[in-house]
Amino acid sequence: MVRIPHALWLLLVLPAVGCQSSWFDWTDMPGLSSFANAEEDDFEEEEKDEFVTKADTPFIGEYTTVAGLNMITLEGVGLVTGLDGTGGDPPPSGYRTALLEQMRKRGVTNPNEWLSRPDTALVVVRADFPPLVKPGDEFDVKVRLPEGSKATSLQGGWLLETYLAEAAVVPGRGMMKGHVFAKAKGPVLVSAGSGDDEDLAGVLRRGRILGGGESLKSRDMSLFLRSDYRSVRNAKRIADRIGTRFSEYNRHGIRTPLADAKTDQKVELRIHPKYRDNFPRYLHAIRKIPFRETTVARRIRLEQLEDKLNTPATSSDAAIELEAAGTEALPILRTALNNPSLEVRFHAATALAYLGDTSGTKHLADAARAEPAFRVYALAGLAAADDGEAMVLLRSLLDEESAELRYGAFRAMTVIDEYDPYVAGEPLPNKDARQFQLHVLPTAGPPMVHVTTYQKAEIVVFNTNQSFRVPFFARAGKHIVVRGEAGSDTITIARHEANVAKRQQVPNSVPEVIRAAAEMGASYPEVVQMLVQAGQQGNLPGRFEQNALPEAGRGYVRPAEGDNSGSSSTVGNRRTAPNLFRIGEEDDD
């Protein structure tokens, strides 16, 4: 037998090793985990599996950053009408010039005369344009009187339609406009103040229009590859991985992936319907999709995740990673529903809900009821479950004591089916001129009236048989008076203004009085004003609540086990709050 020298062996072997060098692309690889970034067709399956099982799986989140989740500040100049003598002629400014130009384009004759009237006021309109909106979506709008305005109050006013654009006021050049993104109009909600130290004059000079903004454009979310991993190949790989996990069927029944590689750095995302009301979780799941992983490595990772899921301290991260894995993880998540820990069951049930599996919905309701730290995510999970059992469970939560649990459950139900007879709203004053929605729920819990001053103009009355405690006197704006005499079972609503006098008597019922006030011309802010007064005076039979929504980022203490005291943890944070339950920031003008 011919013996080959060791040196010759090296010459024969090294070229073979070198021909595999194309398998590596160091610019693609985050640290040692990059060994998993091989082209999968360059090795036999057995060789790859043996190699990758010794390395960590790299995830898409290691390669990318997110764009498109920021708020875009929009501005415009508008005209508020319907003021009760608190308006005034605005002084010369860039705002006035811009508004006059807008009025002329709309064909308004004598625009200066309109601006000088005491029932009108020039206002600066501002909005935070939210992410992932589509044309027609609504959002809140802020209005304020500019410096130097002679107007004193926006109470009772109505903003006429105005366009909102990226804009800035440049000294000496007036208002410089960018692209128009939205339009806005509606009744101005002015804060009632919260104490003796409240600057009432300042409060009356600004307000909010709930859902007054209407989007004219779409905003999508994008992933951008980090510069050191940027390449056409990597962008396509990431889009393919996401598209394999997340897709939807178009109107022709064709499956379409929800990610497209647009450039060597940008991957455009569309949101999956399951996550429309919780896009922070969607993003979290996408970031936990493996960039590359072999069959054996995936099997080993899922086995490790099963152990982590059943350990309370690591169950949150394990659940989202299993959710990102897709239907393959369903058996692991279902088994965890039998875990004695409420925390484990909650995280497993949440992941199952977003995977379209409703076997954990009861555990989500239990978590929402038992632990405030889990509540906001459990209710969002029930909304995502989108089935009859979830609706039944949510309905049972409407009878609980907690105001945020009751209203949160109601909002989740409207996401599943806003036309369900139990929660369907009644447009007031009527469907053709809707200003707000009235929901009257036949619940069995304690009576409560809830109003919102963010996102939605809606009043929810929990328990149908609510009557005002008399004697009762309140105002709905400057011109409408609501009165109930002691011992009377009726309420009188009267409107008094120049040359107009209307009066109506209705049964002493909270919903009936709200309807009558709206029919008499009271706007949503004015009806809210009436209810605020009734609540402060003790005229309501139960609680009066505003914006009672569950919060993200609450602390949670795990039950003690054995000789160990319970450890504490914070569940999520404000940035991870489902958009279903987010509220805006207070005015900072």
Image (cartoon, helix red, strand yellow):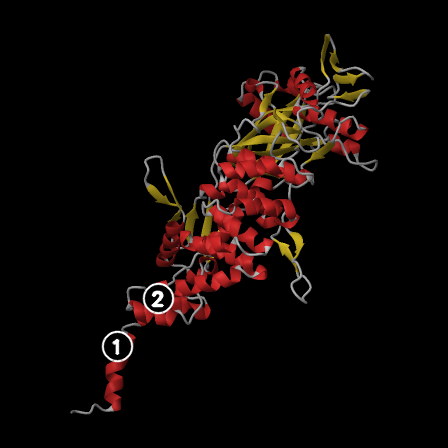
Residue 60: x, y in percent? 44, 58
Mark 2 = which residue? 38
* Image quadrant where one finds the N terminus: bottom left
Q: Say which of 337 and 196 sits in front.
A: 337
Residue 142: x, y in percent? 64, 34
Q: Can you see residue 58?
A: no
Q: Amino acid at mark 1?
A: Ala
Mark 1 = which residue? 16
Check disc 1 and report its element: helix, strand or loop: helix
Q: Quadrant of residue 500?
A: top right
Q: Say which of 273 and 312 sits in front.
A: 312
Q: Can you see residue 350?
A: yes
Left or right for 376, reference 387? right
Q: Amino acid at mark 2?
A: Ala
Q: Earlier in the sequence, mark 1 or mark 2?
A: 1
- Mark 1 nearby-residue class (10 Å; few <14, some 14–19, many ≥20): few
Residue displayed at 51% across by 55% down: 336
Left or right for 423, reference 15? right
Left or right for 44, reference 166? left
* Image quadrant where one finds the C terminus: top right
